[in-house]
Structure formats: C-alpha cells, structure tokens
Image (cartoon, grey):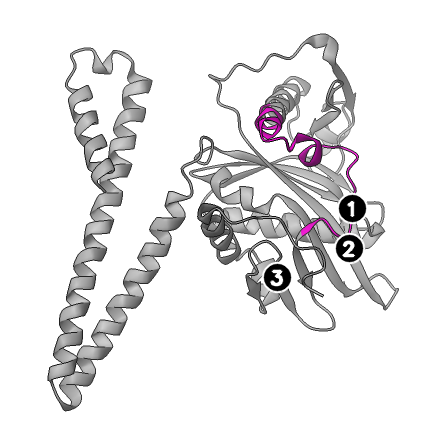
Amino acid sequence: MPQKEARIQEIDAISQAPDFWDDADRAQKIMQERGELVEILESLEKQSTSLEEAELFVEMGLTEEGEEGELAMAEAAEQIEQVEAAVVELETQRMLGGDHDKSSAFISVNSGAGGTDSQDWAEMLLRMYTRYCHAKGWKVEENDLQSGQEAGIKSATLHVSGKNVYGFLKAENGVHRLVRISPYGKQRRETSFAAVKVVPEVDDNIDIEINDSDLRIDTYRASGAGGQHVNRTDSAVRMTHIPTGIVVQCQNERSQIKNRATAMKMLKSRLYDLELQAREDAASQEYSEQREVAFGSQIRSYVLHPYKQIKDLRTGHTVNNVDKVLDGDLDDFIVAYLLKLGSGESMEPVAGSDD
C-alpha cells in the first residue's frame, strides 16, 4: 500500500506539468494507472474496515448471551466471508500485472490425437471458450475455422477483445485431454486431445519486422459459415512464416485484403510471443509446429466416463460439475492458476496424475 500511495503522489506531481497533456495517449495511460491504483487502495481500506467490524461482532458474540450473541457471531462470519472473496479478487487482479495481461488476444484450438473424436472435442472447447468470453463481456470474432471431415473442427482461431483478456486466457495454454464413451458408433472408452494456444494482440507501437521473402501467402476459398459470397471467392488467406514454420489463417471477411491484414496481425502477435518465450528458453516447446498433441503433455483432464470430473494437473483444482465448466464456467480454474502462478510454485503438469 505505501508503494501505491507513493506512486499516486508521483503521478499527481507529474500531471501538474504544463506540457503533461501535450502527449494525450501517454497522459491518458498515466491517469488510467492512477485510477486503478486508487481503486485498489479504496478496496483494501474497505476490507480492512470490514475486518475491524467483524472483530467487534466477535467480541459482542463472546460477551452477549442467547440469541443476540448468536446473531453477532453470524454477522461476523458473513463479514469475514465477504472479505475473503474480495481479497481473492484483489489477489487475482494483482496477478494480471504482466506486460500484456491487459491486452486483447488470439486463441487457437487445434485437434490432436484421436481422429473424429478429437475434432469433436476441439469444437466442444471452442464452444466453451466462446461462452466464457461472452459471459465476461468480451467481444469475440472468428478469424478462421477448418471443419472436420465427419464432425467437429480441425482448427479454429478467435480474436477476443476486452479488458484483461490475455491475462485470463493465458491460463488455458496447453493440451486438454478428454476421456468419454465415443459418440461415433465405437461404444468404447475413447481418449481425445486438443491443443489451445493463446497469444496477446501486439500493440501497434511494437515494431515487428517481417521480410516479404520470409512469407508464403496462399489464398483459397473459405469454408463453413459466412454467406454465399465468401464461399465462392478465393478470399481466405493462409500465411506461412518460413523461418519459424508458424502458420496463420483468416477467412472471416469477404475481402481478401482485410483477411490478409488480419492474418498479418495474427502473425505479428505469434512472432512477438515467440520472442518472449525464447527469452525464457521455452520457444522450442511452446511453438514447435510438429509437437505431438497427445498423452503426457496435457494441462487439464476432462473425464466424462466412468465418472465425471475435470482436474487441472498444474494446480490440482478439481470440479465434478463438468457440464457447468463445458458451458463456459472457467473462472475457478483460471483464478487457481493465477494464484499459483503468483506464488512462484512450479506450474509443470504432472503426467498421469489424474488416473
């Protein structure tokens, strides 16, 4: 709190400069920072006051007899529960202090080992994330979708815009494993995999140099929803960055020019995130286009048979109401991830720990 109070005083001093508003964008960002700091401090003060009130109720409950004492204790318990929830929310917000946590993001879902079941699983995940994002009040745009041969999808990419999008969705990076009875005539227990990749949308102020000679650009006829015009013209764009092997696709616009611009933005975001990962010596694992999406690399396991349970293998967080989660209720998993990330503990998934 003292550091935040000192920063507010510093901003107040900076904002008094005659030329402060000459750079409107910079000034707005600084004042936005001030507003966020004030909001945090006010919330902390509110929780501190609530705890003091709870302490008074406890003292009253210990001294009063009968119904009055019980009511005082019940009021204290209610106050403490509210404070606990507020502190968890504040701690979660603290974990969203990364360089790009406030940014919008691209989220891609790719089917892995498991054939048609895997493609169906990828579509279930796409639905789950779409519902989650809508529930958060974020805007969701489908940049690309490749349908499966029999059912589901081979891959899809969404552009999600809103506050703290990347900060929350980064928790979903990794391989997701599904265990269930196959609905495709096999009538046996089937294990399917799908990979989820989330990258922050690159700020226009960040310069990412891409040489034309490093690009292979293919155009093709869009598939799936989008109207007759979309499906009868070669408006879809596939962009391959040859040095890294990264491939991005966009087909949601009627105009090939617009799809090309969106694909370039996606590619820049992927390349920027690749550079960040390289600094952590993780690029070869995080961005290998040939990496196997299969058993042993999953971050979360969704079991629908012989019992129902979803378990995050990084945090140990477990939920038995699988339908609620698949309908987009992901906050508990994401908050558990952010809190553990902030604790400094290892986030490596434990292979097979859910079996």
Q: Which mark is residue 171?
A: none
Q: Which residue is mark 3?
A: 311
Callout 2 amino acid: Ser
Callout 1 amino acid: Gly
* Magenta region includes residue 172: no
Q: Is residue 324 above or below residue 349?
A: below
Q: Tag 1's secondary structure? A: loop
Quote the CA–CA distance across marks 3 and 2.
15 Å
Q: Position of residue 4 (x, y in %)?
A: 24, 37
Upstream in sequence: badge 1 or badge 2:
1
Q: Which mark is residue 192?
A: 2
Q: Residues within 10 Å of mark 1 (few under 14, many from 20)?
A: many
Q: Residue at x 48, y 22 (%)?
A: 203
**Residue 64 horizontal side relative to residue 293, left or right:** left
Locate the N terminus by quadrant.
Answer: top left
Which region is colored magenta? 272-298
Q: Tag 2's secondary structure? A: strand
Q: Is residue 215 above or below residue 201?
A: above
Upstream in sequence: badge 3 or badge 1:
1
Q: Position of residue 311 (x, y in %)?
A: 61, 61
Mark 3 vs mark 2, foreground winner is 3
Q: Position of residue 155 (x, y in %)?
A: 73, 40
Upstream in sequence: badge 3 or badge 2:
2
Q: Which residue is mark 1?
A: 112
Q: Nearer the viewer, residue 254 or 246?
A: 246
Residue 72 quadrant: bottom left
Q: Nearer the viewer, residue 281 or 232?
A: 281
Labelled pair 3, 2 in contact (Cβ < 8 Å): no
